[in-house]
Amino acid sequence: MTKIETPGADLPLQQLERVVIRFAGDSGDGMQITGNQFTQTSALFGNDLATLPDFPAEIRAPAGTRPGVSGFQLQFSSKDIHTPGDEPDILVAMNPAALVVNLGDLKAGGTVVVNTGAFKANDLKKAKLDKNPLDDGTLDGYRVIPVDINARVLDALVDSPLKTKEKSRCKNFYTLGLMYWLYSRPLEPTITWLHEKFKKRPELVDANVIALKAGFNAGDIRELFQGQYEVPKTDELPAGTYRNMMGNDAIAMGLVAGAKMAGLTPVLGSYPITPASTILESLASYKHFGVVTMQMEDEIAAICAAIGASFSGSLGITSTSGPGMALKTEAMGLAISAEYPLVIINIQRAGPSTGMPTKVEQSDLLQAVFGRNGDAPVPVISCSRPSDAFQLTIDACRIAVQYMTPVILLSDNFIANGAEPWCLPDIESFKPFPVVFKTDPEGHQTFARNEKGARAWVKPGTPKMEFRIGGLEKDVEGNVSYDAANHQAMTNYRHNKVAAVAESIPTPELDGPDSGDLLILGWGSTVGILTQAVETAREDGVSVSRMHLTHIWPFPKGLDEIFSKFKAIMVPEMNMGQLTRILRGEMPQHNFIPFTKVTGQPFLTTEVVAKIKNVLEG
Amino acid sequence: MTDTATTTLTKKDFVSDQEVRWCPGCGDYAILAAMQKYMADSGADPANTVFVSGIGCSSRFPYYMNTYGFHTIHGRAPAVATGVKVANPDLSVWIVTGDGDALSIGGNHLAHILRRNLNVNILLFNNEIYGLTKGQYSPTSPVGTKKKSTPLGSVDRPFNPIAFALGCNATFVARSVDTDAKHLTRILAAADAHQGTSFIEILQNCVIFNKDFYNKVVDRSVRADMTVDLVPGEKIVYGADKDKGLRFTASGLDTCGVDDAEVWDPSTATVSQAFAIAQLDTDPDTPKPLGIFRAVDAQIYDESVHEQVQEAVSAKGEGKIEDLVYSGDCWTVG
């Protein structure tokens, strides 16, 4: 290879407050790895950040085609930020399909780094392009940085023992190196990662490190750019120890912690499904924490095995996504009827049916709250971001064991695969909630209740406490009963028990004035966008308040009083207005205005700001 | 168990206080009585015993046993039992199911529990009919079964539960009859002793919707000639005078005299002999096989799950939440 050691001419170093970068390529080009590496390096460097991975459901869609394009967007900043950014400042396009699919999102006058080596006639054909967008005027108005990455990688790896095909696969690290130079990032975290990742194949470590450095040096030597940028580390994050966190990992950790705080063994029954599978995978790697995982034969078996584990006195857990929730419905009814703790995690994706498995949506809310046969209430909680998923998962475990009930914990694809810095909590600050199993047979009745409305938990193996339980309606003693008054009474008990959960959850804080013309009420992964939108609107002189729900069913106490001080309450959500329906049913006296979007993509800050102004201008 | 360890329990100690609600004359009564007696005679601990069932007439069984019991949802008892057993491998877990519950709606779970070899016992009450929904044909009903949902006769071929279990690589497979308490008790004991999933098909009379369907096989007048009992280590012989035998041939099975009859070994390396015998009754003139078709040792799911946890703890040390959260690439602000 050509060794490049002489630094190039001194180029100006310009400071930026924030940058939005999007990597886009073929689903086999390693764009998710590239994006994650840039994210991790920026996190360790000390930036605040937020990410938006956007990839197809197909593992390797036909190469070079538009459906096969995989993207990863991140915003990194020296200031506190809440979103991955509306519009990229810079787009890295590895092929023609990636360019044309993503160009429309790029900021006016933004920069395109384009891999010109992938714009041959055949490449254009795969992307269904008649003309070459590099020279047909498509890129007019953008700053274009053409680099033949395909050729540069092979040049850099001329001495590598790898075959040409394997050398070509290093092009994402060349690209990453180039971006590291442009934004003055250190190479070390990625080099360390490569050594760990390919520790059994040192030749791959060498090749990727060479490609990474070659890309970095190219930025330096070749004067591709007019200068270098720097996004200083942020001083706006509160003091603490941080790590970069994705939502599913935080949920997996929260389950281990929640079970520990309950004094129970966590037993997961699960079935692989996008985008929830990584919860199963993470928990399977936590066996030394005493975690038991069972990859079952289907979604139904997965929840049934979890219910069986709770019957035996463990904390049963099942993780899935929308279609899997549909399959688990009948079994949820069993856990509701028999009154067993169970944590059910739904990483929502776009529906209906198989829908768009890798895209984001919040359209399983009504399913979670109401979607079962019979009057079958369960508490429903929703994570908002990777950094609150740990604590909310622990709370789901708490509610499940304290109220002897299944709990549904919602998340979505944006939280699951998005990353942000997580200020690590002091574990000692969590109050444990140890389960006490009942062992005294004196006067025991299976469905006798405590002050929370919960029945006692008795495990098999306890002498003199043998009971029979199941999905048939029971009386207080636990005997099958078809008695009319008894069914009404048991239905009331189950309803009141779930309603009583409201006593144990906090009223969400208001962001902004406690009265006014407009309150923005959100839930789930829209939190960053809504925070940003409200801040932007206020900068424009608009008075607007904001609240975000994490505990959705039952609603926290105090909402009615808070809502009564606003003329209108706008409810933005990525569905056709599901929370609005629930709110109107529960609190019809308030003026709820739905704001919905179901494109499989998050809201843009600009859309929300425009809607706020539109509502206020009436 | 502490209190009763020194006391001998009797059958009535395993009888729950629930009124049994099966139809008078139902074969389930005999199976229940045999089970309650077996539990007492074998010294089972009611506190450590769990019956798990799905939905159907047979699945009411747990209510009548004075042990722990979980009456779950249709077809899913094997999946629930998997969680029960894995969460507490010390429990003695019995699954009670029927031909519809196990082989129709729950066919998937039955296949997988047998494949995994969870250390539980499965009792499949086969009456070749849906009872609780009032008499529709089931996945074990013969072709041509005329019932309410098949007025012109069923056209789908039935499952042979024994062949199904053998095909799933089950480690213990047996068949018995509700009315033969002695035989049934012997099979229950063998199943209980087996480590791994024990699968027992019990031919069971539905007196309302499929009365005496099995009489051409198990009626006292024909039973000796129309059934053959597979007893490990004994010759495969049948007939009132035990004068008929079976032997394996290159093409399968053949009848023979007692002298040439095969000594039955349910633990052979391959399942082919058991499979050949399981198919025997496809010919209405040959006897229906009962007894133990298969008994082999294999890796046990619940044990292996816990071994992995123990090995991980030994290798990495018992994990603490702090170590889990404060891991990976961390950085400090302020």
Image: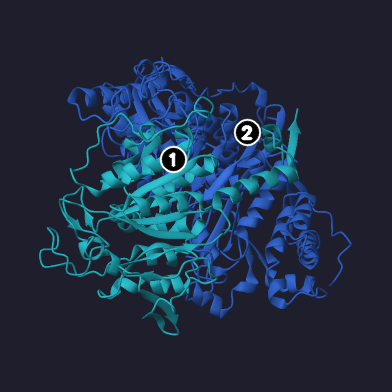
Chain colours: A blue, B cyan
Q: Chain of mark 1?
A: B
Q: Are marks 2 and 1 in contact (CB under 8 Å)?
A: no
Determine if marks 2 and 1 fall on one subunit.
no
Task: Determine whether, in the image, residue B198 is placed left or right of residue B180.
Answer: right
Residue found at the very far bottom of the displayed protein: B250
Specify the farthest residue to the front: B241
In the drawing, does residue A485 fall left or right of residue B246?
left
**Viewer-nearest residue: A616 or B233:** B233
Q: For the C terminus of chain A, give its image quadrant.
A: top left
Residue B252 in picture, x, y percent from top left: 41, 80
Residue in view at x 21 percent, y 69 percent: B143
- The residue nearer to you, when weighing A475 against A237, is A475
Q: How far apart are the alpha carbons under marks 2 and 1?
A: 72 Å
Within-10-Å neighbours for mark 2: few <14, some 14–19, many 20+ = some
Residue B135 visible from this viewpoint: yes
Residue at left 47%, top 47%? Answer: B82
Kindly identify the residue that appears in the image at 35 percent across and 23 percent down: A447
Q: Is residue A340 left or right of residue A29?
A: left
Residue A496, above or below A49: above
Q: Which mark is residue A80?
A: 2
- Res A46 quadrant in image: top right
**Which amino acid lies under the numbered mark 2 shown in the image of this protein?**
Asp
Residue type, mark 1 in image:
Asp
Residue to which mark 1 is pinned: B41
